[in-house]
Image (cartoon, grey):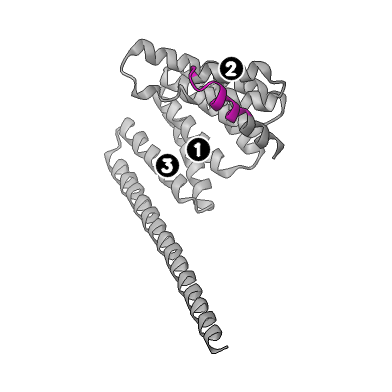
Amino acid sequence: MKKFILLTIFTLGVTLSFASTNPVDSLQKIINDSASDSLKADLYNQMANRYMNYGALQDRSLKNMYQENALHYTLSALHHYYKVDDTVGMRRSYERLAVVYHDQKKYTQAKWFILQANTLAREKADATNIINTLVKLAQIKMDIKDYNLAKGDLREALTLASANCFGKEQADVMQAYVQYYTLTGQPLLKKTAAKRYAGLKDSMKRDSAVKQMAKLQTGKKFYTVSNRRDQNTRQTSVSL
């Protein structure tokens, strides 16, 4: 809570005092004036996120600049997350570094960082992020044509996702399987994986619709009950 309050105060200060300047420069000034490693880590993380939309850029030089800034600020955030032993922040930083290096086709670095993220997820028994990092690891291995190891990662990810009934993660794994079977020239298995992926997505949409309907019905029921109480109250007042 204290960390959240500090971050809120500093963010508000940035908004009020430096609204007319470059947001990244404003955040850097706050970092320079701060002694809190937690705050510095979170602000560096914000700075890195500002450069993660490089995929939409057409200019190659500008895209490269965005990627390098994303790497630079993520590494800075990672340094401070490490100092305060924030393993969630560290894992997210490792994942972002893996994404950028993968996009740069620097597969050795991408693989190393996603393995670090996977290790942290395993230490926390964080099934969701074990699956997510395994899928990302498999995608990197597919790009370097290490198909057998990629298949092993996908198999483990699917087993874990199925055991925990994680619909979204199962869909993500099946989507990666479609990529795997495409690259390895297995059209029948690709078709099967694509069909299962589509089925999982449809199931997720239905579940979402049911939950939304239940939420609306609950609200309607509450509104109806409230109205009845108000009417009863008014009737009682009139009788009195």
The residue wearing badge 3 is 172
**What span is in magenta?**
10-22
As helix, strand or loop, the secondary structure at mark 3 comes to helix
Q: Tell me which label, 2 or 3, sits earlier in the chain.
A: 2
Of the two numbered discs 2 and 1 on the same chain, state the one appearing first in sequence.
2
Residue type, numbered disc 2: Gln
Q: Secondary structure at mark 1?
A: helix
Residue toward you, 233 or 203: 233
The kind of residue on which mark 1 rests is Asn
Q: Are there few (<14), some (14-19), or many (20+) residues within 10 Å of tag 1?
A: many
* Lower position in the chain sequence, tag 3 or tag 1: 1
Quadrant in the picture for the N terminus: top right
Vertical relation: 183 (above or below) 128: above
Alpha carbon separation for disc pair 2 and 1: 31 Å
Q: Position of residue 18 (x, y in %)?
A: 54, 20
Tell me whether the residue at label 2 lies in contact with that at label 3, contact meaning CB atoms closer than 8 angstroms: no
Q: Position of residue 28 (x, y in %)?
A: 58, 17
Q: What separation in Å lies between label 3 and label 1 (alpha carbons)?
A: 8 Å
Of the two numbered discs 2 and 3 in the rendering, the one whose residue sits closer to the viewer: 2
Closer to the eye: label 2 or 1: 2
Mark drawn on residue 132: 1
Q: Main secondary structure of the magenta part?
A: helix
Occupied quadrant, residue 115: top right
Bin the neighbour count of mark 2 within 10 Å (Cα to Cα): few under 14, some 14-19, many 20 and up. some
Point out which mark residue 71 bears. Answer: none
Q: Amino acid at mark 3?
A: Asp
Q: Which mark is residue 28?
A: 2
The answer to whether the residues at label 3 and label 1 have Cβ atoms under 8 Å apart is yes
